[in-house]
């Protein structure tokens, strides 16, 4: 079921509970109002009955026959009140109670009429009057008291039901909200898990049971995206392999062609002018051939270092000591190039395992590139510090040179890629990249044309 429908159903359920509670409250309120109207009528009736009993007592005390007429008038008033409010009385206490009330009032009226027609006072009739008046008064009071108790019961019961209904609605809202939120959180965790797997290169489909709600649709879409990314990744990897192979082949061909052409030309000159060349000239030609051969050997060596980096001989060392030793190797080059150097080495850095010679090679290569980028002099900063997560050490090499164009940055570590034209082989940064990766580290570059370039080396702080 869709989450939207679940939310709608839960809202409908809660609204239904609220409506039922409202209907019940209205019904009870109408009942209470009916009881209140009856109690008002009963109070007026009881007041009339009390006046009747007072007139009755005056008749017995003083023997005043006019009191009977007064009682008769009050009986008519009470009868008129009952007839006027009979519908309210029936709704409140029922037709049976109304009938008994009328009967008691009629008996009382008959007794009063009997005494009024009697020429002399009759003790038997007077006793009947007392009994009828008392019965009428007690019945009215009892009926009023019972209705008050019933009204109080209705109010108390309504209060409890409203309280229970409130907690039922509240609990229902909490439970439904918890259920829906848990469902959403579970789906979001599954989506997070899938996206994290995709970010790590794992394009497997999410095969767990999927709901048929909106999140199920999202997971299906992510599975489809993952499958497409998997196909695209294979295509990209293949195209990158072909591109790298093309760059590598072109670079090797370019780097080897120049010394081979020089060797070929010198060999041809040696053969053609052999007889006319003196001993020193022959030795000079062969020395140049040897130099070009050594150049080819250096290219092949760098290519081998890139394709199959030497295994790092990891030893416990202090990175700041390695930086200082590397700076001694390039200090003369920095002085000649009119470059100011500033070191920012953090103190109390932990010992780490590294191959000091290889890391020095990387630092010398980076400093050399920085010097070549600052042909007119400049500022070189080399610093060390703890990584942001505390589990690594960062070494920064920052220059104020001409910088690297943004379109070149993605290829800066590619083999034979160079921004210096014919100067260099284009393998220095590639070899450095391989050395850092062999140390389980990372190397990053940031650059802005006309401002400078910053290389950051990150080495893990781990025991051997």
Image (cartoon, helix red, strand yellow):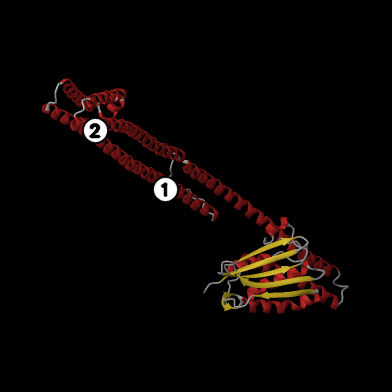
Which mark, residue 178?
Answer: 1
Alpha-carbon span between mark 2 and mark 1: 69 Å
- Relative image position of residue 142 (x, y in whole percent): 22, 35
**438 left or right of 153?**
right
Quarter where residue 134 is shown = top left
Q: Is residue 9 above or below residue 461?
A: above
Q: Residue at x 51, y 54 (%)?
A: 197
Q: In the image, residue 315 lies at what x, y percent?
A: 57, 77
State left or right for residue 21 relative to residue 289. left
Q: Considering the image in quadrants, where does the N terminus appear?
A: top left
Q: Label 2: state its secondary structure.
A: helix
Q: Which residue is mark 2?
A: 54
The answer to whether residue 313 of the structure is visible from this angle is no
Circle 1 Cα neighbour tier, 10 Å, few/some/many (<14 / 14–19 / ≥20): few
* Most distant residue in the right direction: 276
Q: Earlier in the sequence, mark 2 or mark 1?
A: 2
Task: Determine the secondary structure under disc 1.
Answer: helix
Specify few, some or many for label 2: CA neighbours under 10 Å numbering under 14, 14-19, or 20 or more.
Answer: some
Q: Nearer the viewer, mark 2 or mark 1?
A: 2
Instruction: Residue 319: name its quadrant.
Output: bottom right
Nearer to us in this view, 224 or 9: 9
- Residues 291 and 154: in front is 154
Q: Is residue 68 left or right of residue 392?
A: left
Residue 363: percent from left, percent from top: 68, 72
């Amino acid at each position: 079921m869709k989450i939207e429908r679940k939310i709608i159903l839960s809202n409908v359920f809660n609204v239904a509970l609220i409506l039922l509670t409202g209907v019940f409250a209205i019904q009870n309120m109408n009942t209470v109002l009916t009881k209140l109207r009856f109690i008002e009528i009963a109070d007026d009736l009881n007041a009339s009955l009390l006046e009747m009993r007072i007139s009755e007592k005056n008749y017995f005390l003083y023997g005043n026959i006019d009191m009977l007429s007064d009682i008769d008038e009050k009986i008519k008033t009470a009868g008129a009140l009952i007839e006027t409010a009979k519908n309210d009385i029936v709704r409140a206490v029922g037709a049976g109670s109304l009938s008994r009330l009328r009967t008691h009032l009629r008996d009382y009226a008959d007794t009063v009429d009997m005494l009024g027609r009697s020429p002399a006072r009759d003790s038997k009739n007077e006793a009947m009057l007392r009994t009828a008046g008392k019965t009428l008064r007690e019945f009215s009071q009892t009926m009023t008291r019972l209705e008050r108790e019933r009204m109080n019961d209705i109010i108390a019961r309504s209060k409890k039901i409203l309280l229970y209904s409130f907690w039922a609605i509240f609990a229902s809202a909490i439970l439904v909200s918890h259920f829906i939120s848990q469902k959403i959180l579970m789906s979001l965790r599954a989506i997070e898990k899938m996206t994290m797997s995709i970010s790590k290169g794992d394009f497997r489909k999410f095969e767990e049971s999927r709901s048929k709600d909106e999140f199920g649709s999202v997971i299906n879409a992510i599975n489809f995206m993952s499958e497409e990314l998997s196909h695209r990744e294979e295509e990209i990897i293949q195209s990158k392999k072909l591109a790298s192979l093309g760059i590598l082949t072109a670079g090797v061909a370019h780097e080897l062609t120049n010394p081979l052409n020089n060797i070929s030309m010198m060999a041809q000159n040696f053969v053609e002018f052999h007889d006319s060349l003196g001993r020193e000239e022959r030795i000079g030609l062969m020395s140049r051939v040897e130099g070009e051969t050594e150049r080819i050997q250096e290219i092949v060596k760098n290519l081998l270092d890139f394709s199959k980096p030497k295994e790092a001989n990891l030893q416990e060392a202090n990175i700041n000591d390695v930086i200082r030793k590397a700076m001694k190797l390039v200090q003369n080059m920095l002085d000649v190039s009119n470059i100011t150097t500033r070191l920012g080495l953090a103190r109390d850095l932990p010992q780490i395992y590294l191959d000091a010679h290889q890391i020095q090679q990387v630092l010398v290569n980076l400093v050399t590139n920085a010097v070549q980028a600052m042909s007119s002099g400049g500022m070189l900063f080399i610093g060390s510090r703890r990584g942001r997560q505390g589990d690594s050490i960062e070494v920064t090499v920052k220059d104020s040179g001409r910088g690297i164009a943004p379109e070149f940055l993605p290829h800066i570590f590619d083999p034979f890629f160079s921004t210096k034209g014919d100067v260099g082989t284009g393998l220095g940064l590639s070899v450095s990249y391989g050395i850092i990766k062999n140390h389980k580290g990372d190397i990053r570059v940031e650059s802005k044309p006309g401002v400078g370039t910053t290389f950051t080396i990150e080495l893990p702080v781990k025991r051997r």
